[in-house]
Image (cartoon, helix red, strand yellow):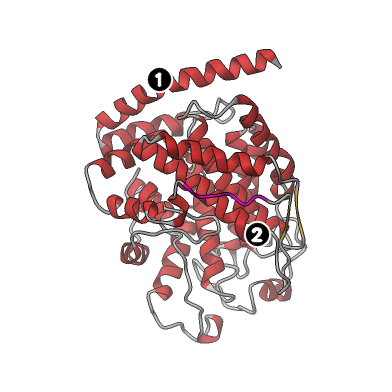
């Protein structure tokens, strides 16, 4: 144990000594030039090599560019920063409310700890971003305080919505922890090890294998959580499981005509006949590019899946794995399809009986940044939807402050 602690101490010391210098160099390179150089390095890194940190959803270079934009009072980043800073999650007197057992039933029975856990995880991430942008150590200390409060208490998640709840919270926990661990020297080794143990025992087992028989948003956010935790924990095996899950679930959730007359069957689900697939797709019998498995349920759940898909691909991108490249046509079609109808286009009779529920969330910045700003693809509907909503804030579930972190941030 002593040698492990010594290695961790040395690694942390190196990060603290070199981190500001490297960030300064990156910032001095300029926005687009810095992004291109960083991206080229990341894409060239073979799978299996050491993870890049910070590298869960937001990279070190992206954090540096956000800091520079806010310091220069540039838009939309300044407005997004002020939105975040004005939220309840940013308060320095924020108090965590940890539960030993988080119970989240799927029906009208009251849950215990569900809202508190999700909000506390978002608060930790918010405080971590504030620390990285402002340099005020009080925010880093608050982020650690929130994470410590939960790691000292929680043991498990129960009830039928346990998988989804765990995934939502774990996605935010991983981003918060990653953004603190590699930029701040005040998180003690003992507390850090306890937080790692919490992720391994109370979170990873619930999400690692996905949930093939449930709606696709469950599977995708579970993969999002798994990948984020895997990077934070330097767990290459679980990272590869999330990659595999992405590769099997995304094609089964967002349709392309190249799939054939019917959508791809979710691997391991047993849903494979025309009748079963139509039922699974909420009665939809006509399939068009970009339609999602839950489009005819509501756009809210389709939007969750757009966000989770982009989160997974973005984290993988920072780790040298180009999952975006494998699904860019499918993802572009899905963003454009849902944005078009969310903006008010009339739904034709073949689509959900001519009625769609327009309730997308703040879920488009990460995908738009890659597809339009990195790849230079045309996404007019998504761009219009996103820019009209800026700054995209938080859904209070697992998406937070992505105009700030990802708007035009290559």
Image quarter where the N terminus lies is: top right
Looking at this rendering, what residue extends furthest in the front direction? Answer: 93
Of the numbered discs in the image, which one, if any, rests on residue 114?
2
Q: Quadrant of residue 153?
A: top right
Residue 328: say if magenta. no
Q: CA distance from mark 1 to mark 2?
A: 39 Å
Camera-near label (1 vs 2) is 2
Residue 246 visible in the current orientation: no
**Residue 187's spot in the image, x, y percent?**
55, 29
Magenta residue span? 93-98
Q: Which residue is mark 1?
A: 18
Residue 384 or 71: which is nearer the viewer?
A: 71
Foreground of the two, 380 or 63? 63
In percent of the image, x 55 and y 63: which residue is there? 254
Mark 2 is surrounded, within 10 Å at the Cα level, by few (under 14), some (14 to 19) or many (20 or more) other residues, namely many
In x, y percent, where is residue 77?
30, 50
**Residue 399 visible from this viewpoint:** yes
Residue 383: quadrant of the picture? bottom left
Res 281 quadrant in image: bottom right
Q: Secondary structure at mark 2?
A: helix
Which percent across, then down, holds residue 164? 66, 58
């Amino acid at each position: 144990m002593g040698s492990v602690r010594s290695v961790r101490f040395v690694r942390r010391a190196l990060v603290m000594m070199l981190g500001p210098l490297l960030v300064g160099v990156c910032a001095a390179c300029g926005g687009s030039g810095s992004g291109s150089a960083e991206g080229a390095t990341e894409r060239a890194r073979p799978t299996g090599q050491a993870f890049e940190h910070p590298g869960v959803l937001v990279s070190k270079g992206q954090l540096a560019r956000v800091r520079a934009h806010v310091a220069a009072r540039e838009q939309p980043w300044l407005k997004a920063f002020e939105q975040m800073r004005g939220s309840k999650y940013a308060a320095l007197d924020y108090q965590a409310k940890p539960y030993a057992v988080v119970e989240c039933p799927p029906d009208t029975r009251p849950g215990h700890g569900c809202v508190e856990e999700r909000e506390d995880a978002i608060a930790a991430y918010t405080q971590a971003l504030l620390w990285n942008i402002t340099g005020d150590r009080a925010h880093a200390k608050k982020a650690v305080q929130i994470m410590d409060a939960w790691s000292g208490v929680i043991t498990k998640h129960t009830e039928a919505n346990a998988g989804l709840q765990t995934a939502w919270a774990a996605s935010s926990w991983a981003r918060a922890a990653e953004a603190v661990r590699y930029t701040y020297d005040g998180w003690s080794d003992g507390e850090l090890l306890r937080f790692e143990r919490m992720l391994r025992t109370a979170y990873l087992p619930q999400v690692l294998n996905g949930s093939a028989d449930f709606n696709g948003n469950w599977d995708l956010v579970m993969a999002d959580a798994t990948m984020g935790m895997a990077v934070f924990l330097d767990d290459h095996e679980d990272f590869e499981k999330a990659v595999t899950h992405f590769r099997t679930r995304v094609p089964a959730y967002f349709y392309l005509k190249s799939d054939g007359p019917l959508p791809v069957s979710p691997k391991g689900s047993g849903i494979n006949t025309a009748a079963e697939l139509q039922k699974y797709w909420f009665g939809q019998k006509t399939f068009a590019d970009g339609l999602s498995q839950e489009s005819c349920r509501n756009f809210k759940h389709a939007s969750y899946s757009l966000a989770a898909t982009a989160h997974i691909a973005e984290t993988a991108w920072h780790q040298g794995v180009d999952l975006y490249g494998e699904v860019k046509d499918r993802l572009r079609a899905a963003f454009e399809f849902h944005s078009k109808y969310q903006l008010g286009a009339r739904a034709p009779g073949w689509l959900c009986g001519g009625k769609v529920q327009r309730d997308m969330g703040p879920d488009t910045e990460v995908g738009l940044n890659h597809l339009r700003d990195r790849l230079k693809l045309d996404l007019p509907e998504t761009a219009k939807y996103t820019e009209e909503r800026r700054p995209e804030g938080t859904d209070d579930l697992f998406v937070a402050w992505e105009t700030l972190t990802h708007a035009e941030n290559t």
